[in-house]
Image: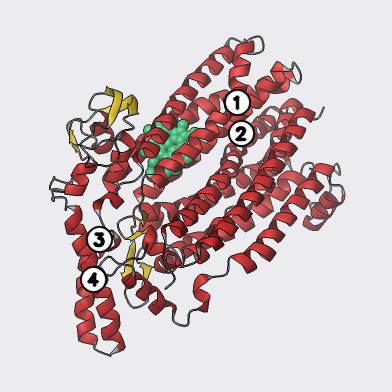
């Protein structure tokens, strides 16, 4: 085996993070703007007012630009599975295959069909058929997102699968447990609604720009009317679904929850940090340095959010390493050492199983398989040399989580103000609000990126929670190869982003057709 | 992109695409160029030359992965 060095691992991670981050610049606008353009067209069909039709066509054009430039950027993530994460790819086998295959077929047929009617079909099909195509375009895109999020959720909470030691693959035992796992369902709602929020922030901001320039005012006001209400609903739903995500994380990934809050020593009735700063001097979970520079807490809220009980015990990082506390199901949490020893047993049993099979010793193989199954939930711990590897990057997870939540609260306020000024018919004359709406667009993008940082950095070192850490998942390539592909991707995506911004800004400046 | 003004005609898929593509605006054409160039870079350059399937060269993929998984565990030394 070629040397598995830390540089290979870091570059492979950086490459995946960079491509996923770029991909997530395109996707949320497709999902969010998709709903808004469909609502605007629905109003046109209901009222017959040509001005709404003009607005719908303009937002569909912007949707088209984003769709064309962003489409297929996600496939690049799939390229990396087979090349850079081949052990992982083999190991997850079926679980990834099925959702992604469904996603591919659905995306191709639904979107290709309906998007072409949306663009080419005005005046060719009836108003209602056209409207249905518009809704189905965004419906198809949202359904695609569902399958991808199912795959992501499975890595965070591997439900509905069984490990087959003969093929060294996970095989699906229950499609529905995979497809409808509570982690997947919650992730879907939180992620999709975050895209709606971004779409609303985008439409409000771009419309505000027209008002600042004092042109296309009627179109801009109509668009803001829809986006302000839609934005308010979306960001309120985001807070609700975000709370659901935190609950799921507490149940299935307590280390991530502890990192999100910088919680080292757990306790009952734990508070949620509203505003806080970590102590930069804290370097390791066991260095006895106070983790916070300062914090303002909402008392008992973390226990309530994570366990739906204001007095529940929330384990901190040190507790999770040491074990010994009661889990929600009544059992006692194992220590890192215990989990690691079980993980090693599982891996050893896999090796012995394979040898016994090769030698045709079926009954011995069956015994090893039983040992493997018993210890499989801790399989991945057998790759960790010490407990520090179990702890994700706490500052990155902590700040990402808190800034995401603060931006969410900020948008609730902004959309409340926009709705209020819209009711009072004062948006057109309120210059500061127009500037605020315009300059808030990047914040929605930042919040979405930070959300993914929480979800993905917070679960390190696992590619599959508790079962497969990074160092077991990565392919034995040379780091040099990965640096080359990293650079190629960075160039390709940067070119696409420049194309997106240039074409979109040009089209926005041109404005809706008269 | 494009809009057709032929109203009240019987719907015809082929004609919709044909007319749509024939009367495409500069923006529509630019976007198609971006899409096609992107797909060519991805599927004709990146995938075959830089992203071959790592396991495709291994005869018995299952035993290769299983050896990797066993070799990398902590009971055996992990190289830096
Ligand atoms: C308002 C309060 C919010 C709360 C309590 C919250 C909570 C969370 C939590 C706990 C996660 C991690 C889920 C996981 O690891 O599976 C998450 C992820 C995420 N968040 Fe938020 N969030 C909030 C607001 C926002 C906002 C405003 C946005 C964007 C506009 C956003 C976008 C995302 C995204 C894209 C992810 C990654 C996908 C996922 O795991 O669901 N969130 N959020």
- Structural crowding at the residue carrying mark 4, measured as other residues with C-alpha within 10 Å and reported as few (<14), some (14–19) or many (≥20): many
User: Percent x, y for residue A240?
Assistant: 38, 32
Q: Which residue is mark 4?
A: A372
* Letter of the chain that mark 1 sits on in the rendering: A
Q: Are marks 1 and 3 in contact (CB under 8 Å)?
A: no
* Residue A241 visible somewhere in the drawing: no
Q: What is the spatial separation of the Cα atoms under label 3 and label 4, in whole angstroms?
A: 10 Å
Q: What is the spatial separation of the Cα atoms under label 4 and label 2, in whole angstroms?
A: 51 Å
Which of the two discs, 3 and 2, sits closer to the camera?
A: 3
Look at the image and tell me in which quarter the C terminus of chain A lies.
top right
Tell which of A107 and A289 is nearer to you: A289
What secondary structure is marked by label 2? Answer: helix
Mark 3 and mark 2 on one chain: yes
Mark 4 and mark 2 on one chain: yes
What secondary structure is marked by label 1? Answer: helix
Q: What is the spatial separation of the Cα atoms under label 1 and label 4, in whole angstroms?
A: 56 Å
Q: Which residue is mark 3?
A: A378
User: Percent x, y for residue A162?
Assistant: 32, 67
Q: Which of the two labelled residues, at mark 1 and mark 4, occupies the earlier sequence position?
A: 1
Q: Are marks 3 and 2 in contact (CB under 8 Å)?
A: no
User: Percent x, y for residue A130?
Assistant: 70, 43
Q: Residue furthest bottom?
A: A360
User: Percent x, y for residue A210?
Assistant: 71, 21
Q: Which residue is mark 1?
A: A226
């Amino acid at each position: 085996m070629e040397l598995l060095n830390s540089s290979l691992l870091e570059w492979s991670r950086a490459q995946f993070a960079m491509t996923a981050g770029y991909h997530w610049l395109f996707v949320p606008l497709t999902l969010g703007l998709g709903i808004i353009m469909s609502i605007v067209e629905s109003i046109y069909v209901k009222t017959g007012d040509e001005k709404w039709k003009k607005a719908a066509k303009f937002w569909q054009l912007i949707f088209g630009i984003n769709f064309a430039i962003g489409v297929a950027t996600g496939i690049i993530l799939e390229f990396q599975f087979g090349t850079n994460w081949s052990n992982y790819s083999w190991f997850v086998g079926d679980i990834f295959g099925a959702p992604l295959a469904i996603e591919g077929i659905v995306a191709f047929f639904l979107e290709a069909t309906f998007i072409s009617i949306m663009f080419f079909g005005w005046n060719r099909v009836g108003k209602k058929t056209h409207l249905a195509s518009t809704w189905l375009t965004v419906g198809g895109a949202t359904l695609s997102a569902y399958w991808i999020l199912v795959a992501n959720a499975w890595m965070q909470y591997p439900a509905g699968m069984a490990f087959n030691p003969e093929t060294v693959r996970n095989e699906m035992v229950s499609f529905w447990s995979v497809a409808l796992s509570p982690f997947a369902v919650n992730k879907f709602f939180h992620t999709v609604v975050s895209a709606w929020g971004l779409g609303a922030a985008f439409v409000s901001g771009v419309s505000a720009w027209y008002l600042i320039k004092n042109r296309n005012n009627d179109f801009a006001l109509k668009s803001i009317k829809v986006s302000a209400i839609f934005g308010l609903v979306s960001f309120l739903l985001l807070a609700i679904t975000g709370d659901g995500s935190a609950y799921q994380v507490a149940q299935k990934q307590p280390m991530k929850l502890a990192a999100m809050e910088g919680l080292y020593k757990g306790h009952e009735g734990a508070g949620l940090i509203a505003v806080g700063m970590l102590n930069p001097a804290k370097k390791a979970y066991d260095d006895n340095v106070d983790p916070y520079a300062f914090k303002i807490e909402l008392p008992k809220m973390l226990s309530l959010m994570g366990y739906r009980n204001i007095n529940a015990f929330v384990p901190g990082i040190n507790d999770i390493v040491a074990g010994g506390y009661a889990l929600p199901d009544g059992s006692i949490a194992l220590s890192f050492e215990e989990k690691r020893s079980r993980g090693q047993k599982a891996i050893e049993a896999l090796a012995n199983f394979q040898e016994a099979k090769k030698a045709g010793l079926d009954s011995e193989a069956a015994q090893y398989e039983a040992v493997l199954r018993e210890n499989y939930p801790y399989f991945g711990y057998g790759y960790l040399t010490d407990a520090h590897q179990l702890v994700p990057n706490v500052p990155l997870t902590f700040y990402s989580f808190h800034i995401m939540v603060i931006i969410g609260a900020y948008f609730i306020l902004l959309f409340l103000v926009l709705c209020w000024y819209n009711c009072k018919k004062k948006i057109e004359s309120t210059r500061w609000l127009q500037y605020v709406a315009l300059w808030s667009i990047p914040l929605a993008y930042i919040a979405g990126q930070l959300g993914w940082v929480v979800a993905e950095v917070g679960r390190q070192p696992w590619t599959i929670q508790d079962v497969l850490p990074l160092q077991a998942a990565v392919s034995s390539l040379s780091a040099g190869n990965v640096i080359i592909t990293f650079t190629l991707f960075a160039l390709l995506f940067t070119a696409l982003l420049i194309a997106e911004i240039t074409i979109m800004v040009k089209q926005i400046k041109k404005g809706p057709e008269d | 992109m494009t809009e057709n003004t032929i109203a009240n005609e019987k719907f015809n898929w082929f004609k919709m695409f044909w007319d749509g593509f024939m009367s495409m605006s500069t923006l529509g054409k630019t976007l198609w160029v971006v899409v096609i160039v992107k797909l060519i870079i991805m599927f004709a350059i990146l995938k075959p030359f830089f992203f071959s399937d790592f396991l495709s060269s291994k005869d018995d993929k299952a035993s290769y992965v299983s050896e990797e998984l066993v070799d990398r565990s902590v009971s055996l030394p992990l190289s830096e």
